Image (cartoon, helix red, strand yellow):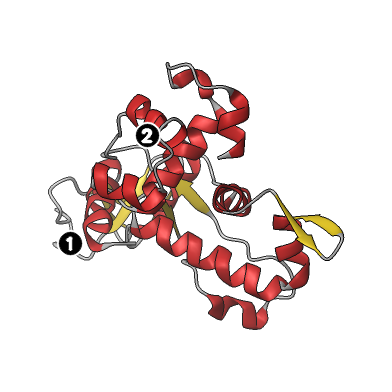
Amino acid sequence: MNSELKEKLIQLAFNRSLPFCYNCYHECPSGQCESCGSDDLMRLVHGVGCEYGTEWVIQHIFETELTPVDLEESFEESIRQCYPETTQVGWMEFDTVTLMKENDPVSWRCAVSDFESNEESDGIIVSFDGGGCAKLQELSGPVVSIAYKLSWEREYLDLKELARLRWIEHWKIERLADYFAVSPTAVKERLRNLKKRPIDIGIPISSKVIRGS
């Protein structure tokens, strides 16, 4: 989680909670207990709990107000955008993503973790347990991470122009990123959303062209 986002979330947690003196067991809106004079106060969220720090408040906000992201599905969609749908090996033809997963599952998990880190760096998601291949040392199954899409203060692209340049002019992801002054990951995220809801594009592009890009 980058420092700027972390500061905003901490401020949000302070706005959504109240200072609370556990020894005297009452709220302290001034930031100092009027009974004992202590400023070593917990944070109280009515109906949720009372604890030191703000991380638990932030997590509560995320769990109740945002929807967890299926990172595996998002990563798979991004891979399908970058590579052909099928791969030929000798005289046989395989689904490219399935071939990757089954041929080298460790590499696939590392790539999912890298994808999570990139998405978080670009401010598209936020996660509480981070990413990275180090987690694989103690895992025998797929990497699982709780991540949430962020919907505030994101830079929105001109989706109509993005779709036209990608699917009519056939611009590469890197060129689109330079043109819109955003990261390649941000471009891929918008394209994924447009593939799910092509009606949002507002220009005549066949679904066959979209799926094949």
Residue 39 rendering spot, x and y as whole percentages: 17, 63
Residue 14 rendering spot, x and y as whole percentages: 24, 49
As drawn, which residue projects farthest toward the right?
A: 91
The front one of 53 and 79 is 79
Other-residue count near label 1 (Cα within 10 Å), few / some / many at <14 / 14–19 / ≥20: few
Nearer to us: label 2 or label 1 = 2
- Local SS, label 1: loop
Q: Residue at x 26, y 50 (%)?
A: 178
- Does 123 sit above or below residue 110? above
Residue 160 rendering spot, x and y as whole percentages: 36, 24
Residue behind mark 2: 165
Q: Is residue 10 visible?
A: yes
Work out how far the residue at label 2 is from the one at label 1, CA to CA, in angstroms. Answer: 65 Å
Residue behind mark 1: 36
Kindly identify the amino acid type of the residue bearing the numbered disc 2.
Answer: Leu
Q: Quadrant of the N terminus?
A: bottom left
Q: Quadrant of residue 200?
A: top left
- Local SS, label 2: helix
Q: Which mark is residue 124?
A: none
Residue 50 rendering spot, x and y as whole percentages: 39, 53
Kindly identify the amino acid type of the residue bearing the numbered disc 1.
Answer: Cys
